[in-house]
Amino acid sequence: MQTAVREAREETGLDITPMGIVTALDSITRDAKGNVEYHYTMIEVLAESAEGEAQAGDDAVAVRWVTMAEIESLCDWPEVARIVQLSALQRVL
């Protein structure tokens, strides 16, 4: 949870309060020979932020809030939309 707080602050300038874990998953990319080229483990954290305007960190061009309908068109990996939907469902419950 400390990592989620730190990353959110670094990437958006916002202070967040973690609410729980949405999901954890692995993403493995293999080269032409089938060897692992990249292996990422992602732990998605549901969080809320007090008032404030997000500001892009030095590793991003821009930051903005989007609607659920916009997510699929903005992300190349369909798993992102699934995780955002899981997060939204957890927030409602």
Image (cartoon, rainbow, N blue to C red):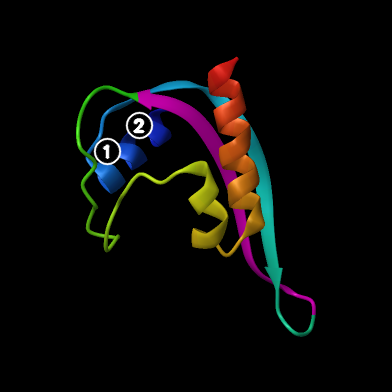
| Tag 1–tag 2 contact (CB < 8 Å) | yes
The residue segment tinted magenta is 34-48
Where residue 51 appears, as percent x and y from the top left, is: 22, 25
> Which residue is farthest bottom?
32
- Our reading of the magenta stretch's main secondary structure is strand
Where residue 63 appears, as percent x and y from the top left, is: 29, 52
At x 43%, y 23%, the residue is 18
- Relative to 60, is 84 above or below? above
What secondary structure is marked by label 2? helix
To which quarter of the image does residue 49 belong? Answer: top left
Depth check: give the residue in front, 42 or 61: 61
Q: Give residue 92's mark.
A: none
- Relative to 45, is 33 above or below? below
User: Which residue in the protein does label 2 denote?
Assistant: 5
Crowding near the residue tagged with mark 2, few <14, some 14–19, many ≥20 C-alpha atoms within 10 Å: some
Crowding near the residue tagged with mark 1, few <14, some 14–19, many ≥20 C-alpha atoms within 10 Å: some
To which quarter of the image does residue 50 belong? Answer: top left
At x 35%, y 31%, the residue is 5
At x 26%, y 29%, the residue is 15
- Relative to 45, is 10 above or below? below
Quarter of the C terminus within the rendering: top right
Q: Amino acid at mark 1?
A: Arg
Q: Amino acid at mark 2?
A: Val
For the residues labelled 1 and 2, the Cα–Cα distance comes to 6 Å
What secondary structure is marked by label 1? helix
> Left or right: 40 with respect to 58?
right
To which quarter of the image does residue 42 belong? Answer: top right
> Left or right: 86 with respect to 16?
right
User: Which residue in the protein does label 1 denote?
Assistant: 9
At x 38%, y 24%, the residue is 48
> Which residue is farthest front?
69
